[in-house]
């Protein structure tokens, strides 16, 4: 029973850590887009350049490898191996 409680506590902590990291990253993305909007309004940036900058910011946000590696580092060794096998199939 004690092992079950410890396992559940560890799993809950790992999941909450992943969710918290995701929320922080989402807030950082919104902050960057808001800053870009302010710069665009202040300096009258061309819409074409604005769209390129916004796409670049969103592309950097959506990079999967950084997130996958960070997520995998928080897993147990066995789960890391299983997940990496699925990713690299």
Image (cartoon, rainbow, N blue to C red):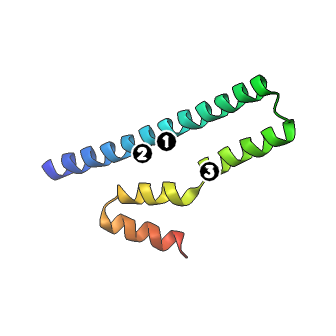
Q: CA distance from mark 1 to mark 2?
A: 6 Å
| Mark 3 secondary-structure assignment | helix
The residue carrying mark 3 is 60
The crowd level at tag 2 (other Cα within 10 Å; few <14, some 14-19, many 20+) is some
Residue at the extreme front of the image, as rendered: 43
10 on left or right of 49:
left
Q: Residue 24: x percent and y percent? A: 48, 36
The crowd level at tag 1 (other Cα within 10 Å; few <14, some 14-19, many 20+) is few
The crowd level at tag 3 (other Cα within 10 Å; few <14, some 14-19, many 20+) is few
Do labels 1 and 2 touch, CB within 8 Å?
A: yes
Q: Image height check: is 32 above or below 60?
A: above
Q: Residue at x 37, y 40 (%)?
A: 16
83 on left or right of 54:
left
Q: Residue at x 32, y 43 (%)?
A: 12
Residue 1 visible in the shown view: no
Residue 19 visible in the shown view: yes
Q: Residue 66: x percent and y percent? A: 50, 57
Q: Residue at x 47, y 74 (%)?
A: 85
Q: Image height check: is 89 above or below 46?
A: below
Q: Which mark is residue 22?
A: 1
**Image quarter of residue 41:** top right
Q: CA distance from mark 2 to mark 3?
A: 19 Å
Q: Image height check: is 40 above or below 79?
A: above
Query: Tag count in the figure?
Result: 3
| Mark 2 secondary-structure assignment | helix
The residue carrying mark 2 is 18
């Amino acid at each position: 029973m004690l092992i079950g409680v410890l396992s559940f506590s560890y799993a809950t902590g790992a999941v909450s850590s992943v969710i918290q990291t995701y929320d922080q990253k989402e807030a950082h993305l919104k902050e960057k887009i808001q800053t870009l909007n302010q710069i665009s309004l202040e300096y009258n940036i061309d819409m074409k350049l604005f769209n390129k900058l916004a796409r670049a910011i969103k592309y950097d946000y959506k990079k999967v490898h950084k997130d996958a590696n960070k997520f995998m580092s928080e897993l147990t060794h066995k789960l890391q191996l299983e997940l990496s096998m699925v990713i690299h199939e």
